Amino acid sequence: MHGTPETRYEIDPAQLREAIASTDDTDRHLVGIYHSHPRTEPKPSDFDIANARWPAQVYVLTSLRSEPPEVFAYRITGGKAPMLPIVES
């Protein structure tokens, strides 16, 4: 956890590597990294983009500023964060 979880998040690299590695022998796959923006829109901040370390993962952001919460997905790589469609089936 980041020292200021109200405004920042931090993923322990060792825990994420373990989560990814533990899916190698099962039908489970890590497909995304989630965090919330309690008071701001659900788009990656400059901090989120600068600190994104896993370009293969989808970053799912939820804003709790409204009801129902807003949820969007992004692929963060190369300093860019294009939005990805979320499809409900």
Image: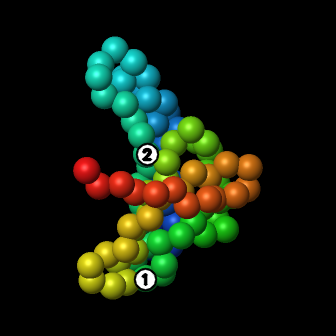
Q: How many marks?
A: 2
> Compared with residue 83, is residue 15 higher up or lower down, i.e. above or below?
above
- Between disc 2 and disc 1, the foreground one is 2
> Compared with residue 76, is residue 26 higher up or lower down, i.e. above or below?
above
- The residue at the point 25 percent across, 50 percent down is 89
Residue 44, by quadrant, is: bottom right
Mark 2: amino acid = Gly
Residue 80, by quadrant, is: bottom right
Report x, y in % for residue 73: 47, 58
Taking the image as drawn, is residue 57 in sight? Answer: yes
Mark 1: amino acid = Arg
- The residue at the point 55 percent across, 61 percent down is 83
Report x, y in % for residue 10: 51, 54
Looking at the image, residue 55 sits to the left or right of residue 31; the answer is right
Mark 1 element type: loop
Looking at the image, residue 25 sits to the left or right of residue 58; the answer is left
Binning the other alpha carbons within 10 Å of mark 1 as few (below 14), some (14 to 19) or many (20 upward) gives few
Mark 2 element type: strand
Binning the other alpha carbons within 10 Å of mark 2 as few (below 14), some (14 to 19) or many (20 upward) gives some
**Front residue (pair 10, 35):** 35
**Front residue (pair 17, 71):** 71
Q: Pointer 2 and pointer 1: residues touching (CB < 8 Å)?
A: no
Report x, y in % for residue 1: 44, 55
Q: Residue furthest right?
A: 78
- The residue at the point 48 percent across, 30 percent down is 17
Q: Residue furthest top?
A: 25
Q: Which residue is mark 2?
A: 32
Alpha carbons under labels 2 and 1: distance apart: 22 Å
> Compared with residue 17, is residue 72 higher up or lower down, i.e. above or below?
below
Q: Which residue is mark 1?
A: 39
